[in-house]
Amino acid sequence: MLTKFGKFVEWTTESEMKTLISVGIILTVLALAQSQRKEDLDGLSEKISSHLESKLPGWQHRRLPPFGTPESKVVVQVWSIPNRIVKVAVAVRWSVEDAKKEIRSFLQFRREPQELTGFGDEAFWPERNGADLVLRKGRYVIYLSIVVYVEEDSDAQNLSKAEQQARAKADTERILKEFATQFSAIELE
């Protein structure tokens, strides 16, 4: 007999007790899995941070909460130096095939995506002259996005509009390729 709110409750069948125990076990397993996912993402975030800190001195970073549902397997970080900000989102997928499908889906409605070589298993500029780069390394899809504030550089007032645009374009490409190079070198698994 069990007590519930001061009253006695009798289990009428053994199957009800087994059902209750099964539900308890399932809830425990789900809670442990959720905890494990968070630990896995925390470890991945730390691995990324540690690598990039050693390879990109001077860059500051912070981790952001992932977008989407709480069970999303995405690590989001923002890296910055004066007047340059890079947002990184690393999506962990179940398989290499799932990661490939995600990239194809992401590129599906982009105009003229440009394939890049030498970065992970595959990499693309989704838009020509854009501020985004996406790459895949195994089952990981890495989204890189940059904002360049050339007009806030100390020498910006000495540059023409065309020179500012050229600097923004050059810095965008250089910095995104540097981050892609570093992500290609990180052992994510």
Image (cartoon, rainbow, N blue to C red):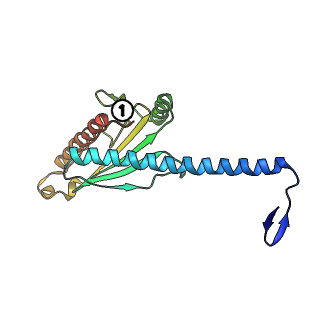
Vertical placement of residue 137 versus 143, above or below = above
Could you say where residue 154 lies in the image, as x and y percent from the top left? Answer: 14, 59
Taking 6 as reference, is 186 above or below it? above
Instruction: For mark 1, give the secondary structure.
Output: strand
Residue denoted by label 1? 124
Q: Residue at x 16, y 47 (%)?
A: 163
Which quadrant of the view contains residue 91? Answer: top left
Q: Tell me: 117 left or right of 189.
A: left
Give the left or right position of residue 174, taking residue 99 as reference.
Answer: left
Quarter of the image that includes the N terminus: bottom right
Q: Position of residue 113 (x, y in %)?
A: 38, 32
Where is residue 151? Give x, y as percent: 21, 56
Quick one: which residue is furthest to the front in this view? 1
Total numbered circles: 1
Whole-percent x and y of residue 23? 71, 49
In this view, the residue farthest toward the right is 12
* Quarter placement of the C terminus: top left
Callout 1: few (<14), some (14-19), or many (20+) C-alpha neighbours within 10 Å? many
Type of the residue with mark 1: Phe
